[in-house]
Amino acid sequence: MTELTPARRRRVLLAAGAGHFVEWFDMGIYGTLSTIIAANFFATGDPTAALLSTFAVFAAGFVIRPLGGLYLGPLADRIGRQKVLSLVVLGTSGATFVIGVLPGYATIGVLAPLLLVLARLVQGFAAGGETSSAVTLLYEYGPPRRRGYFSSYSDTFGFAAFVFGSGLALLLTAALGDAAMTAWGWRLPFLLALPLGAAGLYLRLRLADTPEFRNLEARGAVTDSPLRESLRAGWRGMLVLAGIIVIKGVAHWSLQTFMPSYLQTTLHFSKISSFTAVTVCLAVVAVAVPLMGALSDRIGRRPLLIAGTTGFVLFSWPAFLLMSLGSAPLAIVGMVALGLFIAAYDGAIAATMAELFPARIRSGAIAIPYNIAVSLCGGTAPYIATWLIATTGYSLSPAFYIMAIAAISLLTALTAIRETAGRRAHPTPEPPTAVASESL
């Protein structure tokens, strides 16, 4: 590890981050354009029903994520993080491009939403191996005392992708107008997935696997049955991880996927105003996450996990109230407040997940509970939030769902999380066969 120069680590960060950017641009653009997708792929008549159907298809991509995590996470512990990350970017980019060329409901009727579901299932399966493998790779390449900062870039690049997707939607809407955007302009971001995916794949194929994994290979210590070993040796940590991760799923996908439609359909902001608010908020988060990651290396992971979840419990309703006042600047303030709580939490969560498990089972032990929790709570969050408003007639009701989920993660952080910062800062010395000197 000592032979990894800062320049090499920056190349690792670029390669891993670029692929992660592509991955979450592919997954996130569907949510950003959800109201337009509803108009194109479902029968017209009831906009709320169409939007609920769109979010149901969004959730379908998450339903299959645990299967993807169950297969791809342990696979990364057996064949390597880099190989799995390359497979993942192929799957998601290809499926996203297919969505961009699918005929709409007006052309092929009910076959349109069925094909949309199929593409989302492919996206979701591939995404099941992305976060665990990317977090593991960044953590294992990170400088021993800066692993919170280094691994936090998995979320930084993810939010940068959301910013790019939201900003692209804003620019296209402003340039083309609402009618053209709804008719055909929405396809352009999906078609962009193909060249972006090719770039991400190229960078990932040029990346060597992590020193920790290569040392395991050199010692013949790579597990033959990573799934079985993860369940046997890591089940306690996996239960803890599930408890702390649920707010990540709800907060991320509420902010990125639910908010654009919420601002437009419930609070009656224009598309331009809603995309602007979301873009500003996500940009603030993308900048703040690595700062919080660096802070977690100094003061520990646990204080930031507690601060972020406490913020959601106490301030979600006031933030939604600000958004409901009809002022675009106040809506931005409310969203940025929620975004800062996400940033505090995300700055610590990647390293926390990695430090719960040894390198031998790390990717699989993260992937299984992570994808189950995110699928149950994150993938359904836009649907539940929209359903709550439709059922209760109360426009601020989604805040209470976020608060309830945050309370689960807060309780877990208070009772089940021990401070992990520095616990694995000095890995066990490897024998002379270690391969850290290989080029990246």
Image: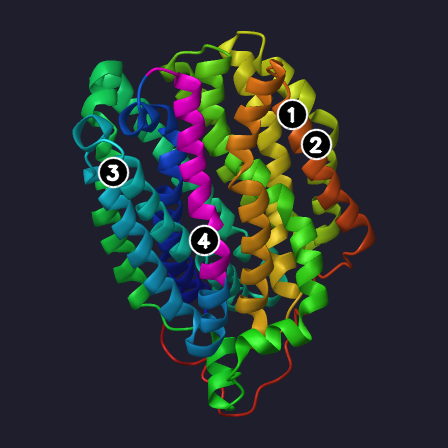
Residue placed under numbered mark 3 in the picture: 111
Residue placed under numbered mark 1 in the picture: 399
* Nearer the camera: disc 1 or disc 3: 3
Q: Please indicate whether residue 182 sits to the left or right of residue 74 in the image.
A: left
First of labels 3, 4 by sequence position: 4
CB under 8 Å between callouts 2 and 1? yes
Residue 359 seen in the current view: no
Q: Amino acid at mark 2?
A: Met
Residue 11 seen in the current view: yes
First of labels 2, 3 by sequence position: 3
Q: Amino acid at mark 1?
A: Ala
Alpha carbons under labels 2 and 1: distance apart = 6 Å
* Nearer the camera: disc 3 or disc 4: 3
- Main secondary-structure element of the magenta-colored stretch: helix
Locate residue 126, reporting x and y percent: 38, 57
- Residue 403 circle label: 2
Q: Residue furthest top?
A: 326
Residue placed under numbered mark 4 in the picture: 64
**Over which residues does the magenta segment extend?**
45-69
Q: Quadrant of residue 16?
A: bottom left
Alpha carbons under labels 3 and 4: distance apart = 20 Å
Question: Quick one: SS at disc 3?
Answer: helix
* For residue 219, above or below residue 142: below
Q: Amino acid at mark 4?
A: Ile
First of labels 1, 3 by sequence position: 3
